[in-house]
Image: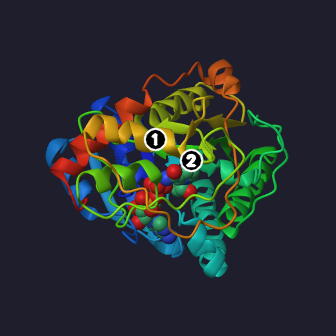
Amino acid sequence: MKKILVTGGAGYIGSVATYLLLQKAYEVVVIDNFSTGHEEVLKFFNTKYPKNFKYYKADLQKRETIKEALDKEKEFDAVLHYAASCLVNESMENPAKYFTNNVIGSQNLFSELIEHSIKNIVFSSTCAVYGEAQYVPVDEKHPTNPANPYGESKRMIELMLQWYGKLGKLNYVILRYFNVCGASDDGEVGDSKDPSVLLMQNAVRGALGIESFYLTCPEVDTPDKTPIRDYINVVDLNEAHLGALDYLINGGKSEIINLGTGTGNSVLEIVTTVEKITGKKLDRKKTEARKGEYAKMIADTSKAKTVLGWEPKRTISDSVNSLVKWYKNHPQGW
Ligand SMILES: NC(=O)c1ccc[n+]([C@@H]2O[C@H](COP(=O)([O-])OP(=O)(O)OC[C@H]3O[C@@H](n4cnc5c(N)ncnc54)[C@H](O)[C@@H]3O)[C@@H](O)[C@H]2O)c1
Protein backbone atom coordinates (compact mmCIF):
# COMPACT_ATOMS: atom_id res chain seq x y z
CA MET A 1 0.00 0.00 0.00
CA LYS A 2 1.42 3.41 -0.98
CA LYS A 3 1.66 6.03 1.76
CA ILE A 4 1.16 9.66 0.76
CA LEU A 5 1.59 12.90 2.73
CA VAL A 6 -0.93 15.58 1.72
CA THR A 7 -0.31 19.18 2.80
CA GLY A 8 -3.43 21.36 2.76
CA GLY A 9 -5.72 18.31 2.75
CA ALA A 10 -8.43 20.22 4.65
CA GLY A 11 -8.81 22.73 1.80
CA TYR A 12 -10.85 22.51 -1.38
CA ILE A 13 -8.56 20.70 -3.83
CA GLY A 14 -6.54 18.81 -1.20
CA SER A 15 -9.70 17.37 0.41
CA VAL A 16 -10.99 16.08 -2.93
CA ALA A 17 -7.51 14.60 -3.51
CA THR A 18 -7.53 12.91 -0.11
CA TYR A 19 -10.99 11.47 -0.80
CA LEU A 20 -9.81 10.09 -4.15
CA LEU A 21 -6.65 8.57 -2.63
CA LEU A 22 -8.64 6.91 0.16
CA GLN A 23 -11.18 5.54 -2.34
CA LYS A 24 -8.24 4.03 -4.21
CA ALA A 25 -6.87 2.42 -1.01
CA TYR A 26 -3.80 4.61 -0.51
CA GLU A 27 -2.69 5.31 3.05
CA VAL A 28 -2.98 9.08 3.59
CA VAL A 29 -1.62 11.48 6.20
CA VAL A 30 -2.77 15.11 6.03
CA ILE A 31 -1.04 18.10 7.60
CA ASP A 32 -2.95 21.39 7.71
CA ASN A 33 -3.17 24.47 9.94
CA PHE A 34 -6.89 25.03 9.18
CA SER A 35 -6.29 28.65 8.19
CA THR A 36 -8.65 28.33 5.21
CA GLY A 37 -9.30 24.59 5.47
CA HIS A 38 -11.81 22.79 7.70
CA GLU A 39 -11.09 20.08 10.24
CA GLU A 40 -14.64 18.69 9.70
CA VAL A 41 -13.70 17.18 6.35
CA LEU A 42 -10.79 15.33 7.98
CA LYS A 43 -13.11 14.02 10.69
CA PHE A 44 -15.39 12.78 7.89
CA PHE A 45 -12.41 10.88 6.39
CA ASN A 46 -11.49 9.52 9.84
CA THR A 47 -14.95 8.05 10.25
CA LYS A 48 -15.18 6.70 6.72
CA TYR A 49 -11.61 5.37 6.40
CA PRO A 50 -10.35 4.81 9.98
CA LYS A 51 -7.60 2.36 8.96
CA ASN A 52 -5.97 4.33 6.14
CA PHE A 53 -6.23 7.91 7.31
CA LYS A 54 -4.57 10.20 9.87
CA TYR A 55 -4.14 13.93 10.20
CA TYR A 56 -2.02 16.38 12.17
CA LYS A 57 -2.54 20.07 12.84
CA ALA A 58 0.76 21.48 11.60
CA ASP A 59 1.77 24.86 10.25
CA LEU A 60 4.30 25.06 7.43
CA GLN A 61 5.51 28.33 8.92
CA LYS A 62 6.47 26.46 12.10
CA ARG A 63 9.04 23.96 10.96
CA GLU A 64 9.01 22.02 14.25
CA THR A 65 5.32 21.16 13.72
CA ILE A 66 6.13 19.55 10.35
CA LYS A 67 9.01 17.69 11.99
CA GLU A 68 6.77 16.37 14.78
CA ALA A 69 4.31 14.89 12.26
CA LEU A 70 7.05 13.40 10.07
CA ASP A 71 8.92 11.93 13.05
CA LYS A 72 5.76 10.00 13.93
CA GLU A 73 4.88 9.02 10.35
CA LYS A 74 7.88 7.59 8.55
CA GLU A 75 8.32 6.05 5.11
CA PHE A 76 6.20 8.11 2.76
CA ASP A 77 6.28 7.20 -0.93
CA ALA A 78 5.51 10.78 -1.96
CA VAL A 79 4.03 14.15 -1.03
CA LEU A 80 1.21 16.13 -2.59
CA HIS A 81 1.86 19.76 -1.61
CA TYR A 82 -1.37 21.82 -1.83
CA ALA A 83 -1.06 24.01 1.28
CA ALA A 84 -0.84 27.69 0.38
CA SER A 85 -2.57 31.02 0.50
CA CYS A 86 -4.19 31.43 -2.89
CA LEU A 87 -6.30 34.58 -3.23
CA VAL A 88 -5.02 36.81 -6.02
CA ASN A 89 -6.64 40.03 -4.75
CA GLU A 90 -5.46 39.42 -1.18
CA SER A 91 -1.93 38.94 -2.49
CA MET A 92 -2.04 42.44 -4.04
CA GLU A 93 -3.07 43.92 -0.69
CA ASN A 94 -0.81 41.81 1.49
CA PRO A 95 2.13 40.44 -0.53
CA ALA A 96 4.12 39.63 2.63
CA LYS A 97 1.54 36.99 3.58
CA TYR A 98 2.14 35.25 0.25
CA PHE A 99 5.92 35.35 0.37
CA THR A 100 5.88 34.19 3.99
CA ASN A 101 3.22 31.52 3.94
CA ASN A 102 3.85 30.14 0.47
CA VAL A 103 7.58 30.58 -0.08
CA ILE A 104 8.96 30.23 3.44
CA GLY A 105 6.32 27.62 4.32
CA SER A 106 7.34 25.54 1.30
CA GLN A 107 11.04 25.93 2.13
CA ASN A 108 10.37 24.60 5.64
CA LEU A 109 8.50 21.66 4.16
CA PHE A 110 11.31 20.90 1.65
CA SER A 111 13.92 20.98 4.44
CA GLU A 112 11.93 18.53 6.55
CA LEU A 113 11.27 16.24 3.57
CA ILE A 114 15.01 16.12 2.85
CA GLU A 115 15.77 15.49 6.57
CA HIS A 116 13.30 12.59 6.51
CA SER A 117 14.60 11.17 3.18
CA ILE A 118 11.27 11.75 1.40
CA LYS A 119 12.19 12.52 -2.21
CA ASN A 120 9.07 12.58 -4.39
CA ILE A 121 6.91 15.68 -4.41
CA VAL A 122 4.00 16.86 -6.55
CA PHE A 123 3.55 20.62 -6.25
CA SER A 124 0.37 22.66 -6.85
CA SER A 125 1.39 25.52 -9.07
CA THR A 126 -0.81 27.72 -11.20
CA CYS A 127 -1.22 29.28 -14.63
CA ALA A 128 -0.79 32.59 -12.74
CA VAL A 129 2.97 32.03 -13.15
CA TYR A 130 2.56 32.80 -16.88
CA GLY A 131 0.85 36.18 -16.40
CA GLU A 132 -0.97 37.45 -19.47
CA ALA A 133 -0.83 34.89 -22.28
CA GLN A 134 1.40 35.90 -25.18
CA TYR A 135 -0.15 33.08 -27.22
CA VAL A 136 -2.82 30.44 -26.66
CA PRO A 137 -2.94 27.59 -25.98
CA VAL A 138 -0.22 28.21 -23.39
CA ASP A 139 2.40 25.46 -23.25
CA GLU A 140 4.97 24.92 -20.51
CA LYS A 141 7.64 26.79 -22.51
CA HIS A 142 5.58 30.00 -22.41
CA PRO A 143 7.58 32.69 -20.55
CA THR A 144 6.67 33.16 -16.90
CA ASN A 145 5.76 36.70 -15.90
CA PRO A 146 3.36 36.70 -12.92
CA ALA A 147 1.01 39.69 -12.59
CA ASN A 148 0.53 39.39 -8.82
CA PRO A 149 2.44 38.31 -5.69
CA TYR A 150 0.43 35.06 -5.52
CA GLY A 151 1.72 33.97 -8.95
CA GLU A 152 5.20 35.24 -8.06
CA SER A 153 5.23 33.21 -4.85
CA LYS A 154 4.42 30.08 -6.87
CA ARG A 155 7.14 30.88 -9.42
CA MET A 156 9.64 31.28 -6.57
CA ILE A 157 8.67 27.87 -5.17
CA GLU A 158 9.01 26.33 -8.63
CA LEU A 159 12.55 27.75 -8.87
CA MET A 160 13.43 26.37 -5.44
CA LEU A 161 12.15 22.95 -6.45
CA GLN A 162 14.15 23.07 -9.67
CA TRP A 163 17.34 23.67 -7.64
CA TYR A 164 16.53 20.81 -5.27
CA GLY A 165 15.93 18.69 -8.35
CA LYS A 166 19.26 19.65 -9.96
CA LEU A 167 21.08 18.94 -6.70
CA GLY A 168 19.47 15.50 -6.43
CA LYS A 169 17.65 16.26 -3.17
CA LEU A 170 14.04 16.07 -4.43
CA ASN A 171 12.24 14.65 -7.48
CA TYR A 172 9.28 16.78 -8.47
CA VAL A 173 6.32 17.15 -10.74
CA ILE A 174 5.16 20.77 -10.80
CA LEU A 175 1.54 20.92 -11.93
CA ARG A 176 0.32 24.28 -13.22
CA TYR A 177 -3.44 24.33 -12.77
CA PHE A 178 -5.77 26.44 -14.85
CA ASN A 179 -9.27 27.20 -13.40
CA VAL A 180 -10.35 24.48 -11.02
CA CYS A 181 -14.07 23.78 -10.65
CA GLY A 182 -16.59 21.20 -9.40
CA ALA A 183 -16.71 18.92 -6.36
CA SER A 184 -16.26 15.16 -5.86
CA ASP A 185 -18.58 13.31 -8.28
CA ASP A 186 -20.88 12.18 -5.43
CA GLY A 187 -21.07 15.75 -4.06
CA GLU A 188 -19.68 14.66 -0.66
CA VAL A 189 -16.50 16.78 -0.68
CA GLY A 190 -16.07 20.27 -2.13
CA ASP A 191 -15.13 23.93 -1.77
CA SER A 192 -16.02 25.73 1.48
CA LYS A 193 -14.69 29.17 0.66
CA ASP A 194 -17.28 31.66 1.80
CA PRO A 195 -17.87 33.73 -0.16
CA SER A 196 -16.41 31.67 -2.93
CA VAL A 197 -13.95 33.42 -5.22
CA LEU A 198 -14.38 30.99 -8.08
CA LEU A 199 -16.87 31.76 -10.85
CA MET A 200 -18.63 28.41 -11.23
CA GLN A 201 -18.87 27.89 -7.46
CA ASN A 202 -20.30 31.42 -7.10
CA ALA A 203 -22.81 30.96 -9.90
CA VAL A 204 -24.11 27.68 -8.43
CA ARG A 205 -24.35 29.23 -4.96
CA GLY A 206 -26.23 32.15 -6.54
CA ALA A 207 -28.62 29.82 -8.37
CA LEU A 208 -29.33 27.86 -5.16
CA GLY A 209 -30.01 31.10 -3.27
CA ILE A 210 -27.03 30.64 -0.91
CA GLU A 211 -25.46 33.98 -1.82
CA SER A 212 -26.04 36.81 -4.28
CA PHE A 213 -24.37 36.41 -7.62
CA TYR A 214 -22.78 39.29 -9.48
CA LEU A 215 -20.75 39.25 -12.65
CA THR A 216 -17.41 40.84 -11.89
CA CYS A 217 -15.72 40.43 -15.25
CA PRO A 218 -14.51 43.32 -17.40
CA GLU A 219 -15.40 43.70 -21.09
CA VAL A 220 -12.65 42.07 -23.10
CA ASP A 221 -11.96 41.22 -26.71
CA THR A 222 -13.75 37.85 -27.06
CA PRO A 223 -16.90 36.95 -29.09
CA ASP A 224 -19.29 37.51 -26.15
CA LYS A 225 -17.02 40.13 -24.51
CA THR A 226 -16.44 38.05 -21.36
CA PRO A 227 -13.08 36.45 -20.47
CA ILE A 228 -12.33 32.93 -21.67
CA ARG A 229 -10.72 30.52 -19.23
CA ASP A 230 -9.87 26.83 -19.12
CA TYR A 231 -12.07 25.13 -16.50
CA ILE A 232 -10.66 21.86 -15.19
CA ASN A 233 -12.77 19.56 -13.01
CA VAL A 234 -11.26 19.00 -9.56
CA VAL A 235 -11.52 15.18 -9.76
CA ASP A 236 -9.92 15.09 -13.21
CA LEU A 237 -7.21 17.39 -11.85
CA ASN A 238 -6.57 15.10 -8.89
CA GLU A 239 -6.53 12.02 -11.12
CA ALA A 240 -3.59 13.68 -12.87
CA HIS A 241 -1.93 13.93 -9.43
CA LEU A 242 -2.34 10.17 -9.01
CA GLY A 243 -0.66 9.80 -12.41
CA ALA A 244 2.15 12.09 -11.25
CA LEU A 245 2.61 10.00 -8.08
CA ASP A 246 2.96 6.79 -10.11
CA TYR A 247 5.30 8.56 -12.51
CA LEU A 248 7.63 9.72 -9.71
CA ILE A 249 7.44 6.49 -7.70
CA ASN A 250 8.43 4.58 -10.87
CA GLY A 251 11.52 6.77 -11.27
CA GLY A 252 10.24 9.41 -13.72
CA LYS A 253 12.41 12.54 -14.08
CA SER A 254 11.31 15.90 -12.71
CA GLU A 255 8.85 17.77 -14.93
CA ILE A 256 6.62 20.85 -15.17
CA ILE A 257 3.16 20.08 -16.58
CA ASN A 258 0.01 22.12 -17.30
CA LEU A 259 -3.35 20.82 -16.10
CA GLY A 260 -6.33 22.13 -18.00
CA THR A 261 -8.74 20.83 -20.63
CA GLY A 262 -7.26 22.56 -23.67
CA THR A 263 -10.66 24.14 -24.36
CA GLY A 264 -11.84 27.52 -23.21
CA ASN A 265 -15.24 28.61 -21.94
CA SER A 266 -16.36 32.19 -21.55
CA VAL A 267 -17.73 33.49 -18.28
CA LEU A 268 -21.15 33.80 -19.98
CA GLU A 269 -21.04 30.18 -21.14
CA ILE A 270 -20.44 29.05 -17.55
CA VAL A 271 -23.28 31.21 -16.25
CA THR A 272 -25.64 29.90 -18.97
CA THR A 273 -24.73 26.26 -18.18
CA VAL A 274 -25.48 26.85 -14.49
CA GLU A 275 -28.82 28.43 -15.45
CA LYS A 276 -29.71 25.51 -17.73
CA ILE A 277 -28.90 22.86 -15.10
CA THR A 278 -30.52 24.61 -12.13
CA GLY A 279 -33.45 26.14 -14.07
CA LYS A 280 -32.72 29.43 -12.32
CA LYS A 281 -32.11 32.73 -14.10
CA LEU A 282 -29.08 34.47 -12.63
CA ASP A 283 -28.82 38.17 -11.96
CA ARG A 284 -26.35 39.60 -14.47
CA LYS A 285 -25.73 42.71 -12.43
CA LYS A 286 -22.17 43.86 -13.00
CA THR A 287 -19.90 45.01 -10.19
CA GLU A 288 -16.44 46.43 -10.46
CA ALA A 289 -14.17 44.20 -12.50
CA ARG A 290 -11.30 42.39 -10.84
CA LYS A 291 -8.00 44.07 -11.61
CA GLY A 292 -5.58 42.51 -14.04
CA GLU A 293 -8.10 40.29 -15.91
CA TYR A 294 -7.02 39.32 -19.40
CA ALA A 295 -9.09 38.09 -22.34
CA LYS A 296 -8.07 34.50 -22.90
CA MET A 297 -6.15 31.80 -21.02
CA ILE A 298 -6.21 28.24 -22.33
CA ALA A 299 -3.80 25.41 -21.56
CA ASP A 300 -1.88 23.29 -24.00
CA THR A 301 -2.33 19.93 -22.28
CA SER A 302 -0.36 17.71 -24.65
CA LYS A 303 2.50 17.24 -22.16
CA ALA A 304 0.14 15.88 -19.49
CA LYS A 305 -1.05 13.33 -22.02
CA THR A 306 2.42 12.22 -23.15
CA VAL A 307 4.16 12.22 -19.76
CA LEU A 308 1.33 11.15 -17.43
CA GLY A 309 -0.99 9.40 -19.90
CA TRP A 310 -3.74 11.64 -18.51
CA GLU A 311 -6.71 13.29 -20.16
CA PRO A 312 -9.63 15.05 -18.50
CA LYS A 313 -12.93 13.18 -18.76
CA ARG A 314 -15.51 15.42 -17.13
CA THR A 315 -17.50 18.16 -18.90
CA ILE A 316 -18.50 21.61 -17.64
CA SER A 317 -22.00 20.18 -17.00
CA ASP A 318 -20.51 17.33 -14.91
CA SER A 319 -18.74 19.95 -12.79
CA VAL A 320 -21.89 22.03 -12.34
CA ASN A 321 -23.91 18.91 -11.42
CA SER A 322 -21.34 17.88 -8.78
CA LEU A 323 -21.45 21.41 -7.31
CA VAL A 324 -25.24 21.38 -7.15
CA LYS A 325 -25.07 18.11 -5.15
CA TRP A 326 -22.31 19.47 -2.90
CA TYR A 327 -24.00 22.79 -2.10
CA LYS A 328 -27.41 21.14 -1.60
CA ASN A 329 -25.81 18.90 1.06
CA HIS A 330 -23.51 21.60 2.46
CA PRO A 331 -24.89 25.08 1.68
CA GLN A 332 -22.29 26.74 3.92
CA GLY A 333 -19.51 24.26 3.21
CA TRP A 334 -18.01 22.26 6.10
N1 LIG B 1 -8.48 26.81 -6.63
C1 LIG B 1 -7.88 27.02 -7.81
O1 LIG B 1 -8.55 27.30 -8.84
C2 LIG B 1 -6.38 26.87 -7.93
C3 LIG B 1 -5.78 27.15 -9.17
C4 LIG B 1 -4.40 27.01 -9.27
C5 LIG B 1 -3.65 26.54 -8.21
N2 LIG B 1 -4.25 26.30 -7.01
C6 LIG B 1 -3.41 25.83 -5.90
O2 LIG B 1 -4.00 24.66 -5.34
C7 LIG B 1 -3.73 24.60 -3.94
C8 LIG B 1 -5.00 24.36 -3.18
O3 LIG B 1 -5.92 25.41 -3.45
P1 LIG B 1 -7.38 25.42 -2.80
O4 LIG B 1 -8.27 26.14 -3.72
O5 LIG B 1 -7.72 24.04 -2.35
O6 LIG B 1 -7.13 26.36 -1.52
P2 LIG B 1 -7.69 26.22 -0.01
O7 LIG B 1 -7.45 27.55 0.62
O8 LIG B 1 -9.07 25.69 -0.02
O9 LIG B 1 -6.73 25.13 0.61
C9 LIG B 1 -5.44 25.42 1.10
C10 LIG B 1 -5.21 24.57 2.35
O10 LIG B 1 -3.89 24.79 2.82
C11 LIG B 1 -3.96 25.02 4.23
N3 LIG B 1 -2.81 25.87 4.58
C12 LIG B 1 -2.56 27.14 4.16
N4 LIG B 1 -1.43 27.59 4.72
C13 LIG B 1 -0.94 26.59 5.51
C14 LIG B 1 0.20 26.46 6.35
N5 LIG B 1 1.07 27.45 6.53
N6 LIG B 1 0.37 25.29 7.00
C15 LIG B 1 -0.51 24.26 6.85
N7 LIG B 1 -1.60 24.33 6.08
C16 LIG B 1 -1.81 25.49 5.41
C17 LIG B 1 -5.29 25.69 4.48
O11 LIG B 1 -5.77 25.60 5.80
C18 LIG B 1 -6.17 24.92 3.48
O12 LIG B 1 -6.67 23.75 4.08
C19 LIG B 1 -3.01 25.90 -3.60
O13 LIG B 1 -1.63 25.65 -3.55
C20 LIG B 1 -3.35 26.81 -4.75
O14 LIG B 1 -2.36 27.78 -4.95
C21 LIG B 1 -5.59 26.45 -6.85
Crowd tier of the residue under label 1, counting other residues whose Cα lies within 10 Å: few below 14, some 14–19, many 20 or above: many
Can residue 42 be seen?
yes
Q: Mark number for residue 270?
A: 1
The residue nearer to you, when weighing 301 against 327, is 327
Label of residue 251 in the image: none
Disc 2 designates what residue?
A: 118
Amino acid under label 2?
Ile
Question: Which circle, 1 or 2, is nearer the viewer?
Answer: 1
Instruction: Estimate the x, y position of residue 26 in percent, counting from the top left.
Output: 35, 34
Residue 2, placed above or below residue 183: above
Q: 210 or 115, which is in the foreground? A: 210
Image quarter where the N terminus lies is: top left
Q: Distance between the Cα atoms at labels 1 and 2?
A: 41 Å
Q: Residue at x 37, y 60 (%)?
A: 213
Query: In the rendered view, does 1 fall on the left or right side of 51?
Result: right
Specify whether 84 is left or right of 188: right
Q: How is the image coloured?
A: rainbow
Nearest the eye: 319 or 153: 319
Q: Amino acid at mark 1?
A: Ile
Let me know if residue 69 appears in the view.
no
Residue 199 is situated, as x and y percent measured from the top left of the image, at: 46, 52
Q: As drawn, is 38 to the left or to the right of 13?
A: left
Q: Residue at x 16, y 49 (%)?
A: 329
Give the class, few, some or many, for how many residues have Cα within 10 Å of label 2's Cα (few <14, many ≥20): many
Give the residue at x 60% y 48%.
226
